[in-house]
Image (tube, rainbow, N blue to C red):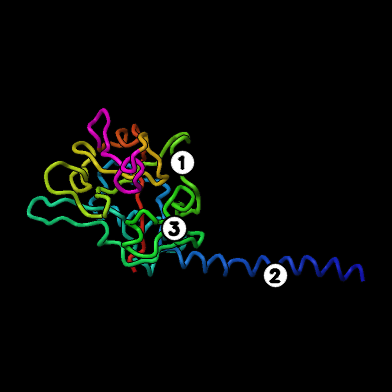
Amino acid sequence: MKLLTKIAMPACFALAVIAAPPALAQTASDTSFFLTSNGVGNGGNLGGLAGADNQCQTLAQAAGFGAPKTWRAYLSTQAADGQGAVNARDRIGKGPWKNVKGVVVAKDVADLHSAGNNLTKETALSEKGEVVNGAGDKPNRHDVLTGSQADGTAFAAGEDRTCKNWTSSTQGAAMVGHFDRKGLRDDDASKSWNTSHPSRGPDGGCSQADLKSTGGDGLLYCFAAN
C-alpha cells in the first residue's frame, strides 16, 4: 500500500504540470495590451509608425500572443509633407484591453482616455508579465513615447512632438507619458500616462541618450487592434 502511494503522488504531480500550460495559454491568448520591455534602441527614430507597430508585433510574437492579432503602437503623428495627422486613439481598436495577467486596463477608447482607466505601474506590465521600472527605481524608465495629447489625438503641425513622425534620432522632441502616473509636480498633467512632458536632453530630445536622461528608454504602449 505504501509503495502504491509513493508511485501515485508523482503521477498526480506530473498530471498537474501537464495541465498547467493550457491555462497559461488561455491567458496569453486574451492578452491585448502591454508595455514594451525594451525600445527600438534608436531614440525617436522608430522607423515611422510601421516600425513601431513591428516592434509591438515582434515582442507579442516572441511572448506567444502575436498572430492572428494585429498589434499597434499607441502613437500619433503630426501633419507634414502633405500627409494628414494620425491620432493614436484611432489606431488601437475598440477594446477592452487586458494585460498579460488578464487584468482589464481599459474597457474602451473613452475609458482609456478618462481619469478612471486602470493603467498603473502594477497593471502596465511588459509582454513578459513583468513590472517595469518607474520613478524611484534605478534606472527610471517611466517615460513612454506617445506623441499625443491627453485625449489621444495628434498635436497640431508646427512644434515637433513626434521626433519628426518617429523618423529622427537627431532633431525634434517627443511627447511622453508616465505609465506609473508619477511626476515631478503635483499637477495632473505631469502624472499623465500619455502626455506628461516633451522629451529633452543634450542632443535636443530624440536621441537614445536624450530619452534616457529624463527617465525613459524609448518604450511603447502596444494594443491589439483586433
Q: Residues within 10 Å of mark 2 (few under 14, many from 20)?
A: few
Q: Is residue 193 magenta?
A: yes
Q: Amino acid at mark 1?
A: Asn
Q: Is residue 184 magenta?
A: no
Is residue 152 or residue 86 the one in the foreground?
Answer: 152
Q: Which residue in the rendered view is the most extreme toward the top?
A: 202
**Residue position marked by numbered label 2 in the rendering:** 15
Residue that appears at 25% across and 35% down:
205
Q: Which residues are magenta?
A: 187-205
66, above or below 144, in the image: below
Q: Residues within 10 Å of mark 1 (few under 14, many from 20)?
A: some
Q: CA distance from mark 1 to mark 2?
A: 37 Å
Q: Earlier in the sequence, mark 3 or mark 1?
A: 3
Q: Earlier in the sequence, mark 1 or mark 2?
A: 2
217, above or below 69, in the image: above
Q: Position of residue 51 (x, y in %)?
A: 27, 53
3 vs 1, front mark: 1
Q: Amino acid at mark 2?
A: Leu
* Mark 2 secondary-structure assignment: helix
Residue that appears at 47% across and 67% down:
29
**Residue position marked by numbered label 1 in the rendering:** 133
* Mark 1 secondary-structure assignment: loop
Residue 185 occupies quadrant: top left
Q: CA distance from mark 3 to mark 2?
A: 27 Å
Residue 168 occupies quadrant: top left
Q: Which residue in the rendered view is the most extreme toward the right?
A: 1
Is residue 15 or residue 89 the one in the foreground?
Answer: 89
Task: Identify the disc placed on residue 62.
Answer: 3
Q: Would you say 190 lies left or right of 180 here? A: left
Q: Amino acid at mark 3?
A: Ala
Q: Please tell me whether the stretch drawn in magenta is mainly helix, strand or loop.
A: loop
